[in-house]
Image (tube, coloured by chain):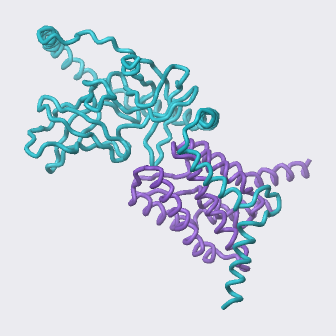
Chain colours: A purple, B cyan
Amino acid sequence: MVYIYKQIKFKFFELLPLLLLFFISLNGNSIIGLKYFSINIHYILVYYWVLRRPRALGYGFIFLSGIISDVVFGLPLGINALSLLIIAGTAAYVRVVTVRVTLINDWISFIPALLIANFVYFLSLYFSNYSVDYLFLFKNSVFTFIFYPILWGIFSLILNLTKS
Amino acid sequence: METSREDFGIAVRSAFLAKGTKQRFSLFVLIILSIIFLFAETIETKPLNYLRSFIKDTIYRGSLVVSIPFKSFDNIVENINKHMNLYNSYSKLKIENDELKNNISKSDFLELENTQLKKLIEEQVSSSSNLVSARIMLDKQSPYLNSLIINIGSNKNIENGMAVLDGKNFIGRIVDVNFFSSRVLLVSDLNSKISVISEPSAHHAILTGHGENVLSLEYLPENHNIKDGDKVYTSGKEGIFSPGIPVGVVKIEKNIVTVSLFSDLSQITFVNVNLEDLEKDK
């Protein structure tokens, strides 16, 4: 009984990142808009899990989740998928070149990931003739970066639960 | 130097081309697929449109199901707040009711006068409005697109460009039609620009959204005499919307002309889609 319970708990925490990924895209919570700023939790989720436990989030699922976000937000199909895959690609590159896992390393390497992904996002919107609020995009990038450590802590907790 | 360049190449190849454990696709393949999707968005063919409609309809239904617990929670919170404010609301409504009673007689007279004047200029008095009602399925406010999803689409003859009303007030237009759902671009969106006319000052202008609830009037004549409290209606000048649909009321603050909408965009459950223009075309 205890073994079954442990197995269920393990499976649940192992599947949690995937469930979160689809939940936030289907529920339209990829970008949490607060009064003065907004945070892109979709980016943080993909970046963290691809960096730490790539088998928890398949690239195919990331692509699918991006397509769902595009449909829910009414953007041309492929924009979110492309930027999420760019984030995943940067995380995969960082994983290959780094040995030690620290918050500071992750946090600093998140900067180029954010910059490239948002640049691709902006370009795709621009060429799709969508008006873009540049200030919003800038503020969103800054606050997503600032809030990274908080979500890093939460995700690390989940990761530890799957290990234990 | 060359070794570090080689290392970089190996790392990039490993990240983008190699398939990890439990990965069915490499990142490179999926990135190319995303770019193909993006380009496919610009191609308008029947099979592609059907595929897009099918994908969107399916995802909207999925999203609707996922958001049910949150909607229920929001409804509970709203109901609790309503109950807490019951006494205040009652007092306000009582005052409003007295004012309305006083205004009714005045309004009846104005309506009669208006009908007589319209007859005088041989305008069509009774417009054969052709509205279809729809329920809002999703109102996920994207930071890049202020829009709503409604539960009718090509199955109810909805077409792109049709005006969407909250009661009789203009709130947006149809921008994307699927089989059983459509997307409404709200007037508050950055991409929304509609031609309007102010009343009684009778100035034509373009109503522009800024992603927030306050909209602005652009391209007003230099010596306009628009005043605080003037009403704004669709002018129909662009040939898409019927003229005279109420939109909002003018507010002037520090010489900046803004418009606040008659409808609260966050409180809409049902909308009407105006099929009139479609019927005219037919």
Answer with the quarter of the image where residue A83 lies: bottom right
B27 with respect to B45 (left or right): right
- The C terminus of chain B sits in image quarter: top left
- State whether residue B49 is above or below residue A61: above
- Residue A144 location (% of width, % of height): 52, 63
Q: How far across and down, in percent of the image, does residue B213 sit?
A: 33, 42
Residue B200 appears at what percent x and percent y?
12, 29
Vertical position of residue B127 compared to residue A97: above or below? above
Image quarter where the N terminus of chain B lies is bottom right
Q: How many marks?
A: 0
Nearer to the camera, B80 or B231: B231
Residue drawn at x 56%, y 52% as measured from the top left: A79
Quarter of the figure with residue B279: top left
Residue A46 point in image, percent of width and height = 65, 59
At x 82% / y 54%, what residue is drawn? A10
Q: Is residue B117 above or below residue B195?
A: above
Above-or-below relation of B49 to B274? below
Q: In screen coordinates, is A52 left or right of B151?
A: right
Q: Nearer the viewer, residue B240 or A59?
A: B240
The extreme bottom residue here reads: B1
